[in-house]
Image: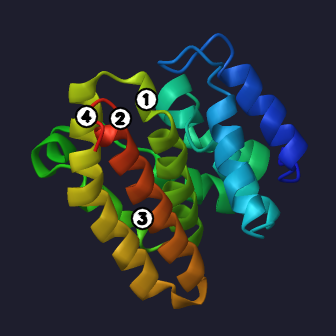
Amino acid sequence: MKFPASLADALEFAKQKHSGQTRKHGTPYIEHPLSVALVLAGWGYNGEDLLVSAVLHDVVEDCGVTIQCISDHFGEQVASTVKLLTKEKTDQEVKSGLIGYYESLTSSRPACLIKVADRLDNVKSLSHLDEQEQAEYGLKTRRDFLPFIAQCAARYPEDHLYWVEMERAILSLITQASCGSNNC
């Protein structure tokens, strides 16, 4: 039985699935997918499937929910986007790194929009990591993620301002985190 992809239903579903989970800095995990959806809505991306996908983007990877369950409850489009956003923990991915993962995301505008908002929210919480973790995350973001944003920008030029401003914000936050204890 398929239910309409409703944002309220997705929020309740994600809240239930993430129940008891916290981020490294101690806040309830549900705040993260909600923040990702709010970033998108703040940019005027108000499509229901997009926002539902943003709220559900971590439930498969972190909560053991199946793609079929997402499809049954929220529809095939949402399930397809969530599937793309879910990192498979296979030997091949470990060998090839995240480059293939990012390349696969560029086939979907919603997946690109969500992943960039996801990274922005993750970078906002860098101050809760130790200096070495901050430096590693910043390096990975510069090396792997910024080229991903460039690929999204090339593929979806209609979102030019979003890509430019999100890249600027992510770089600014990484720089702040790396300079925080060094007084750059």
Whole-percent x, y for residue 151 in the image: 35, 77
Q: Earlier in the sequence, mark 3 or mark 4?
A: 3
Q: Is residue 150 found left or right of 173 in the rendered image?
A: left
- What is the crowding at mark 2: few (fewer than 14 residues within 10 Å), some, or many (at least 20)? few
Marks 3 and 1: which is nearer the front?
1
Element under label 4?
Answer: loop
Location of residue 43 with respect to 21 vertically, above or below: below
Q: Are marks 4 and 2 in contact (CB under 8 Å)?
A: yes
Residue 29 seen in the figure: yes
Sooner in the amino-acid sequence: mark 2 or mark 3:
3
Residue 130: where, in percent of width, then height?
Answer: 30, 21
The residue at the point 35 percent across, 35 percent down is 180
Mark 2 or 3: in front is 2
Question: What residue is pinned by disc 2?
Answer: 180
- Mark toward the start of the polypeptide (3 vs 1): 3
Identify which residue is drawn at 51% across, 65% down: 166
- Direction left: furthest residue: 95
- Distance between mark 3 and mark 4 Cα atoms: 35 Å
Q: Which mark is residue 127?
A: 1
Let me know if residue 70 appears in the view: no
